[in-house]
Image: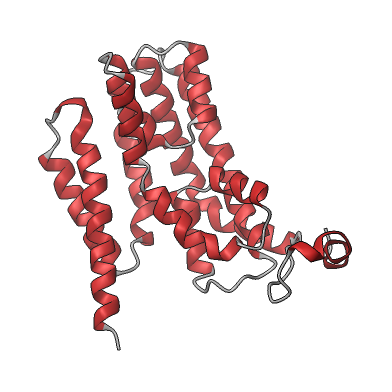
Amino acid sequence: MSISDATSTDNRNIPPELPLPERNSAAFRDGIKATFPTLFGVAAWGMVVGIAMIKAHLSLTQALAMTMLVFAGSAQLASLPLIAAHAPVWMIFVTALVVNLRFVIFSAVMAPHFIHLKWRKRLLLGFWCGDLSTGLFLQRYPDEKPAPEKASYLTGLLIPNWLAWEIGSIAGIFLGHQIPEQWGLGFAGTLAILCITVPLVANRAALCGVAMAGAMALAGASWPYKLGLLAAVIAGMITALAMDEWSERRSP
């Protein structure tokens, strides 16, 4: 939709100081180019999660529904041991919720960039938006000032990421019983994700959060119901937020 079309149809609903959103093919292509190097790792990690769902004795229908509705690999992996152990439903939901609390922070950071969009589009972008997409978007647009090409760029990041995840996850679901555990796909997927995420640790707060989360994950590796992962996520977020606030207070 062009700026002129938007002005004639919905200009009254957007504050005049904000630029109107428009489809920007160049920004969309830039988003695809930026996320392209990450797609192999995303697909590999999706395959790991797909295989894990089958190994946890989910039915084909349950596994496919989970990969379509729960676009969060960490929440899926944290929930699967609880499902296999027949843990209470409330514990499964709380675990998935806490593991995904980082997305609340992501939403708070991303919201000012898209405050001028309708809530339906913000809801759709929010569902698709994950760790890597958020990091790549903020690398290009650290300034919160709205720009009309931001939505197109983010969409270019999100669609390939989602497709790679779904293709990898569905492949893992259908191949789960045929792929032997000796292949070590879980380790390979972890290495692929590490290669992608390490460059995104761009400041001291993020580095401290990662270090704390890693230490807590190791300390809680033997805890039941994968509670060590839960504690690691909470500890990492708290540490990163505290370090960020401390750095802001020290800066002039």
Looking at the rendering, which quadrant does residue 240 occupy?
Answer: bottom left
**In the displayed structure, would residue 28 be above or below residue 81?**
below
Looking at the rendering, which quadrant does residue 44 occupy?
Answer: top left
Furthest-bottom residue in this view: 252
Residue 98 appears in the rendering: yes
Quarter of the N terminus within the rendering: bottom right
Residue located 65% across and 59% down the image: 151
Of 232 and 202, which appears nearest the observer?
A: 232
Residue 181 appears in the rendering: no
Residue located 28% across and 13% down the image: 86
Quarter of the C terminus within the rendering: bottom left
Residue located 32% across and 18% down the image: 83
**In the displayed structure, would residue 153 be above or below residue 53?**
below
Residue 140: give x, y in percent of width and height. Answer: 53, 68
**In the displayed structure, would residue 70 be above or below residue 113?**
above
Residue 250: give x, y in percent of width and height. Answer: 24, 82
Residue 70: give x, y in percent of width and height. Answer: 48, 31
Q: Which colour scheme appears in the figure?
A: secondary structure
Residue 202: give x, y in percent of width and height. Answer: 35, 67
**In the displayed structure, would residue 98 be above or below residue 245?**
above
Of 20 and 71, which appears nearest the observer?
A: 20
Furthest-front residue in this view: 12
244 left or right, relative to 22: left
Q: How many marks?
A: 0
Of 224 and 10, which appears nearest the observer?
A: 10
178 left or right, relative to 212: right
Of 216 and 194, which appears nearest the observer?
A: 216
77 left or right, relative to 145: left
Residue located 47% across and 47% down the image: 130
Looking at the rendering, which quadrant does residue 32 occupy?
Answer: bottom right
